[in-house]
Amino acid sequence: MSAGSAAELFRRTFGRDPDGIFSAPGRVNLIGEHTDYNGGLVLPFAIDARAQLAAGRGDSSKVRIVSAQKPGEVVTVAPADIEPGAPAAAGWPGYLLGSFWAVRQTGRPLEPLDLVLDSQVPSGAGLSSSAAVECATVLAVSALAGYRFDPLTVARLAQRAENDFVGVPCGPMDQTASAAAADGAVLLFDTRAGTVENIPFDPAAHGLAILVIDTRVAHSLADGEYGRRRASCERAADVLGIRQLRDVPFSGLPAALDRLPDPELRRRVRHVVTENERVARTVALLRAGRIVEIGDLLTASHASLRDDYDVSCPELDLAVDTALAAGALGARMTGGGFGGSVIALVPAGRIDTVGAAVTAAFADHGWTAPVLRSVTPAQGARRDA
């Protein structure tokens, strides 16, 4: 994505220059899946695929939205009509309109805006395309209105847009990674405490690379599966008499499982508690400079997501198994599940070998070829111009 692509489309559409250009990245979660809405630990990093937004103060009484990915379509909405459940909230415009709405919910007055989106974060790949759009929009809307929000506030408002406007009950990880991640680092986010710490993460310095395998199996977290997983965790916490599953220590897992009569709830709790432990162990290894050793933890995470949380699918499992057989040190699904992407820790010299093996395995099954991307940690949301 060139720095001026959204700006050029803005000029062609509205006949003037934008007042600012903003962007926010997609993210890959290294480890820590489905823990964020349980008060747990997550370890994502931003990637170099970004959603870019050219924004200008409106010269009409409406909010007008254009996307480079939806040629010719101009969405026009009166500010008073930007409310959850309104017709304008449906589909892709909802992520931008919801972000406008979330900023307005802080009590700050907002004027109409013209917004042009050009996102290179693939949708449905488990790389948080929606969070990238939301964070870029919150940053743009607030900046043009003269408000300065810190990254965690940007993330919180972006999450509110997705929860309360779009209607997806996601936890805070995706938006926090998109807003607060640093170049060359993974973001340790304690969702209970609300604290973040960027930890240096340089696979290349250890002769390694991060390969993202997009299975091209589109998932929709709004179809109820995500919400059902979250509800089951809340039921388990209620049975255990705790606020969130984060309150179950790893050492206390056997006792907690004994108190749960429902086999499904036991599996959900086992995943969340062991996943928090895997994040903590991964962080300890990274701090010690032992990045090569995190591979087994990544693979164990996938097995837990597959067997205890039931959010994998055949394409994700094949990508993981094939990558490991071809030389990856560890691999796991990343994102909400039911499709999307796999992340693999691979010796740099075996990237092509692993990618070719996964592509061949998909062809053998008659499946659409996966999209392969090598990713490196990138900067979070920012103003580009």
Image: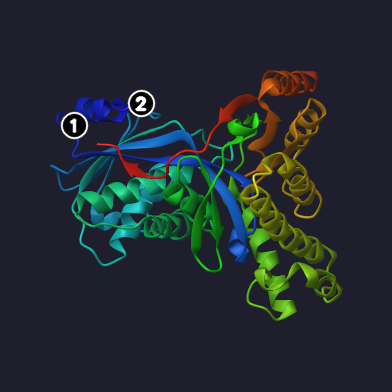
In this orientation, which residue lies closer to the viewer: 209 or 325?
Answer: 209
Question: Which residue lies at the image location 20% right of the left edge and 53% below the top edge?
Answer: 145
- Which residue type carries mark 1? Phe
Question: Which residue lies at the image location 80% right of the left edge and 19% below the top edge?
Answer: 364
Q: Quadrant of the C terminus?
A: top left
Residue 289 x, y percent position in the rendering: 64, 44
- The residue wearing badge 1 is 14
Q: Could you tell me if residue 163 is visible in this image?
A: yes
Relative placement, left or right, of 66 versus 341 is left
> Disc 1 to disc 2, how far (Cα)?
14 Å
Dot 1, crowdedness within 10 Å: few (<14), some or many (≥20)? some
Most distant residue in the bottom direction: 241
Secondary structure found at label 1: helix
Asked which colour scheme the image uses, the reply is: rainbow
Q: Is residue 197 above or below residue 363?
A: below
Question: Which residue lies at the image location 38% right of the left edge and 60% below the top edge?
Answer: 153
- The residue wearing badge 2 is 71
Residue 196 x, y percent position in the rendering: 49, 58
Residue 282 x, y percent position in the rendering: 68, 51
